[in-house]
Amino acid sequence: MEQNARNQITLWGPTGEIVDYANKQWSGVVSSYFLPRWTLFLDYLNTSLATNTSFDQNKYNTDVLNNVEKPFTYSLETYPDTPSGDSYQIAKKLYQYWIPKVSASQNLSPFATLS
């Protein structure tokens, strides 16, 4: 049953038929699923840039499926189900860090409405 639940929020089928269709940013999914996927993607991208070769999407897809996505769906690793730290203070710190960067890059007030 756990494998089915993990598969539903990641691959949505045995070979990623509609990968990420029902993705969630739940405890453990970001650190144990999305982070390794991004890390592998950036490794492939850096290798392509360093060797001046084309990014091999098919090779990457196979590698990420077999070495990140499938292993996650079969894992029995457990994750905390209660928050750690002060959620308000963490959110405030993230907001204070990112809002100047987002506002500057978009030339927006932090409270502007988008049309």
Image (tube, rainbow, N blue to C red):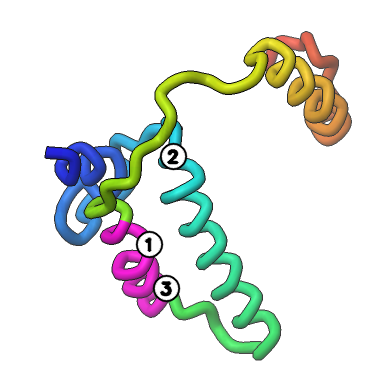
Toward which corner of the image does residue 106 lie, by quadrant?
A: top right
* Residue 8 located left or right of residue 86: left
Q: Which of 113 and 15 is in front in this view?
A: 15
Q: Distance between the residues labelled 1 and 2?
A: 13 Å
Mark sitting earlier along the chain (2/3): 2
> What is the quadrant of residue 9 in the picture?
top left
Amino acid type for the residue under numbered disc 1? Val
In the rendered view, tell whether residue 19 sits above or below residue 66. Answer: above
- Residue at the image position 35 percent from the left and 39 percent from the top: 78
Nearest the eye: 60 or 115: 60
In the image, what residue occupies the spot 64% across and 20% down?
A: 85
Query: Which label sits in the foreground, 2 or 3?
Result: 2
Give the mark, 1 or 2, whose residue is nearer the N terminus: 2
Tag of residue 60? 3
Label 1 packing within 10 angstroms: few (<14), some (14-19), many (20+): some
Q: Name which residue type carries label 3.
A: Tyr
Task: Name the residue carrying label 1.
Answer: 68
Foreground: disc 1 or disc 2: 2
Point 43% across, 29% down: residue? 80
Question: Which labelled disc corresponds to residue 28?
Answer: 2
For marks 1 and 3, give the one nearer the viewer. Answer: 1
Q: In which quarter of the image is the N terminus?
A: top left
SS class of the residue under badge 1? helix
- Specify whether residue 66 is painted magenta: yes
Question: Percent from the top left, x then y, of residue 111?
Answer: 78, 9
Is residue 5 something that shows in the picture?
yes
Q: In this view, does 88 lie to the left or right of 75?
A: right
The magenta region covers 58-71
Alpha carbon distance from label 1 to label 3: 11 Å
